[in-house]
């Protein structure tokens, strides 16, 4: 009898230490958490992401596919308590920076994650360098934690596909009313996509920011900003472009002198 009582007391002591004392937890300032009960995330009624403003950027055909439930988000603080059948999933919501050429599934790709290759509209293979800033969306933690197996892989593939499409179709804004040296610039530089891209990096970055607004509803990640810092063609093309630019500058200078 005493042996059986000792087993009961030992079990109760183990249960109290394992599940009661260790059942308390905290959430740091840069973290958010979601609780699952028997593997099911705590939901906010029947609300879904389609009821949140972040879904406004989704295309009509995407709304059914990315119709994730809204979950109850545990804010920073504590201590909080959880039962043994409950599990806490914490994520950092701090803004992070990553090289746009980084491939999470193959870190050695794209020259070790430093240069991303893309093809321009005149079939010129060029290298892109830059960074993107991102953070986990507090409004769609379900997608980040449970909806997508590897959100970073998806968001990088999404960003790269949009960027390559933009590079392949980009044309600099044209103004019909240009005259003189500006008109010569258009005629001399026509069809040279690298020059257009280099002169309009800000326009390209702004386009990427607009096109990636739906990433929070898709994958639970907000792309805060993209910053393309370099567009470099192969060396032989670079030398040809330098010659073209030199000739263009000389022509522009002669026209300006003649007009003066």
Image (cartoon, grey):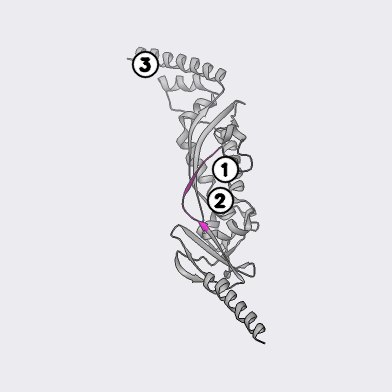
Of pointers 2 and 3, the one earlier in the residue sequence: 2
Residue 218 sits inside the magenta stretch: no
Marks 2/3 in contact by CB < 8 Å: the verdict is no
**Against 128, is 69 above or below?**
below
Q: Position of residue 153 (x, y in %)?
A: 61, 46
185 and 17: which is toward the camera: 17
Locate the N terminus by quadrant: bottom right
Q: Position of residue 68 (x, y in %)?
A: 61, 61
Question: Is 3 on the left or on the right of 249, as rendered?
Answer: right
Q: CA distance from mark 1 to mark 3?
A: 43 Å
Helix, strand or loop at mark 2 = helix
**Marks 2 and 3, how far apart at CA:** 48 Å
| Residue at 42% from the left image edge and 13% from the top image edge | 250
Label 2: which residue? 215
Q: Main secondary structure of the magenta part?
A: strand
Query: Which circle, 1 or 3, is nearer the viewer?
Result: 1
The residue at the far left in this view is: 260
Give the residue displayed 57% in from the left and 39% down from the top.
Answer: 102
Describe the element under mark 1 as helix, strand or loop: helix
Instruction: Report the residue marked by disc 1.
Output: 159
Q: Position of residue 200 (x, y in %)?
A: 47, 32
Residue 256's disc number: 3
Along the viewing direction, whichever of 171 and 93 lies nearer the viewer: 93
- From the viewer's perspective, is residue 139 above or below residue 211? below
The structure residue drawn at horizontal position 52% and vertical position 16%, both measured from the top left corner, is: 239
Question: Badges 1 and 3: C-beta atoms under 8 Å apart?
Answer: no
Circle 3: element type: helix
Q: Quadrant of the C terminus?
A: top left
Magenta stretch?
91-100
């Amino acid at each position: 009898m005493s042996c059986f009582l000792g087993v009961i007391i030992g079990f109760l002591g183990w249960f109290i230490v394992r599940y009661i004392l260790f059942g308390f937890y905290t959430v740091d300032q840069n973290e958010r958490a979601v609780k699952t009960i028997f593997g099911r995330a705590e939901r906010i009624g029947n609300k879904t992401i389609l009821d949140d403003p972040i879904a406004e950027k989704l295309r009509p055909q995407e709304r059914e596919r990315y119709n994730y439930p809204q979950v109850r988000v545990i804010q920073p603080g504590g201590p909080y308590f959880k039962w043994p059948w409950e599990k806490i999933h914490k994520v950092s919501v701090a803004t992070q920076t990553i090289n746009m050429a980084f491939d999470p599934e193959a870190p050695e790709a794209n020259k070790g994650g430093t240069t991303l290759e893309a093809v321009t509209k005149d079939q010129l293979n060029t290298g892109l360098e830059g960074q993107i800033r991102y953070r986990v969306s507090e409004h769609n933690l379900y997608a980040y934690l449970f909806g997508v197996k590897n959100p970073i892989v998806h968001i990088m593939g999404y960003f790269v596909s949009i960027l390559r499409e933009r590079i392949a179709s980009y044309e600099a804004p044209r103004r019909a009313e240009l005259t003189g040296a500006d008109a010569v610039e258009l005629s001399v530089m026509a069809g040279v996509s690298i020059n257009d891209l280099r002169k309009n990096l800000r326009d390209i970055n702004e386009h990427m920011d607009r096109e990636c607004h739906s990433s929070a509803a898709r994958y639970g990640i907000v792309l805060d900003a993209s910053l393309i810092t370099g567009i470099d063609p192969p060396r032989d093309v670079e030398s040809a472009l330098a010659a073209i630019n030199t000739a263009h500058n000389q022509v522009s200078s002669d026209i300006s002198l003649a007009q003066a």
